[in-house]
Amino acid sequence: MKSTIYTYVVSVVLSVILFMGCKSSMVIEKVDYSQSIESVITPNEDGLVKDIQRGLTFNIKPLQYAETQDTSEITTKQVRYIRGQEGYYYITAPNYKNVYVMAPEKGKLQLKEKLAVSESGIEKPALNQRASHVQLLSRTSGDSWKLYPEKAKKNSSQIVKKEGN
Amino acid sequence: MKSQILFLTFICSLLATSVIAQETQSDYEIQKEFKQQYAQFEDKLETVSSPDKAEKLITSIKDFDQKFEDHSKLLNKALHPKTYEQKMKALKRSSVVTKERLTTISQQTKKLDELQTQLASYKTDMNRLNKKNDSLQEAMAKSIKSEKKLSGMLKEYRRNLEKRDDLILAFIDSMVVAYQQMDLEALQDLENIDKKSRIKSNGDALEMIHDISAENLEVLEKNANKLRLQDYMRMAEVQQQFEMMWTRLGDKIQEVYDGENAEMLAKEVERNISQWNQKLKTQTFAALHDTLSDNEVTVDEFKNSTQFYNSLSSYLNKQIKQSKENGSKANFKKFEQFQEFWNRVEMQWSSNFVDSGIIGESDMATLNARVDTWARHAKPNSNNMLVYLLGASVLLAVTLGVMLIREKKTG
């Protein structure tokens, strides 16, 4: 009797494993999510950022709080973001000290990395899509950074060399 | 020295700043600037008002292309589904089309200015001639007793009318040349661009056509007793040219005219032309009858082309019959008098006769043939024979007389 139950349980477990193995077999490889040109959006009074062209809506409040520790009013006048090759969103705003790398998930954007770029904040930031990375640019000083999902690397030259589009 | 160094430092920092500013433009700003400037060029092409400015715009567009062509790959993405090349091509084509359009408009404006000057000059001349004719008419009314004086004035009056007709023909030529080449769309464009009212000269044109048609009608009504057949023939030519011009260009002239009463003026012009034509015909038939009477050609009354043909035809038939039966000197004289009139008709007015509907082409040919027949029979051949016979008899008598005298002498 004991061996019959054992055989029954083993066969059920094996069937479940086999069934699960067959279910999610399709994967599309080498997907490029890169967005050619950054989106520049003005949030509304509730902090809602609506990018109608790209079909993305999110609230800037969590990022503003991370920067200023204050969300009593929306002080972020402009949000600039670009989607990198891997699919992460690089989000920043004027006078922000960081670039936020956000991973899209079901109904939410999950912080993957907070990239510190300037202690005083960048007055006029811009994000450019480049072949291997996302470029962060200070339009006032000309400083630039190479942004990757895990790190930000400042370029040595003060004047940004022309990088291919 | 110190100030020079300071100045140089300032210049260098300025240059550096400008380089940085240029180099630090982001992709977003590049495409934004491109789109903004492109839209500005499109706006400028809509509002540019002269070929010179359009030419400058073409040069600016070339510079604009040079400035952004390095970013064409980026812009291809920003402008998707169109490409940078497609957008630039469209802008350049549009700039060339605009320049061509403005060149046409500019030429049109020039022509209209010329026409305006011409119209002003015609108007002055026409007024001068009208005044002169009015004063001549007054003078003629006063000096009706002095036949010699009256005759001189009448001649001058008719000469003035001739000059007036020449002026109208010149006006018609100018109108035809100006309006045939006129591009109404271009004029509409000009109006849209300059926000001006329609060119004044065109208003003058419709008004002047209206005035001429009304005045000519008046001239006919007032001067039936002073005009001769040759005057009517000239007037018929003017009327035909005038009517032809109105048929061909009337709609255009009316379209271009800016006044509220355009339709009313145009209708009056049509009515005047029609009455002018009718009156001219009636008076021409009367003058024709007078001319025939002056030449002692007695024909039945006629008031239209059929009656005229029938009347002349029956006269010729009668004369031909008489010539055939009895070709007398009196008949020959009649022929000569008729021929004098008919030669003038044939040489000078045949086309006027046909064009103004006085007689049909085939009827004219028939009458010509009858005149030829009359010519063949009109010569008093029998009388000549008698003269020849008489001459021959005299010669024979003289010869015989000489021979008789010689015979007597020798005898």
Image (cartoon, grey):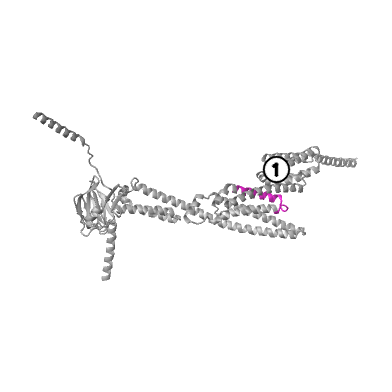
Residue A95 visible at all = yes
Residue B166 is inside the magenta segment: no
Question: Could you say whether the residue bearing mark 1 is in a helix, strand or loop?
Answer: helix
Residue B165 visible at all = no
Q: Output the chain of dot 1.
A: B
| Foreground pick, B403 / A125 | A125
For mark 1, what is the residue?
B305
- Rendering coords of residue B6 (x, y %): 26, 68
Q: Which quadrant of the figure contains the N terminus of chain B?
A: bottom left
| Residue count near mark 1 (Cα–Cα under 10 Å), binned few <14, some 14–19, many ≥20 | some
Q: In the visual, does B142 lie left or right of A31?
A: right
Q: Which quadrant of the figure contains the C terminus of chain B?
A: top right
Residue B224 is inside the magenta segment: yes
Residue visible at 68% across and 58% down in the picture: B133
* Start-end of magenta stretch: B222-245
As drawn, which residue projects farthest toward the front?
A1
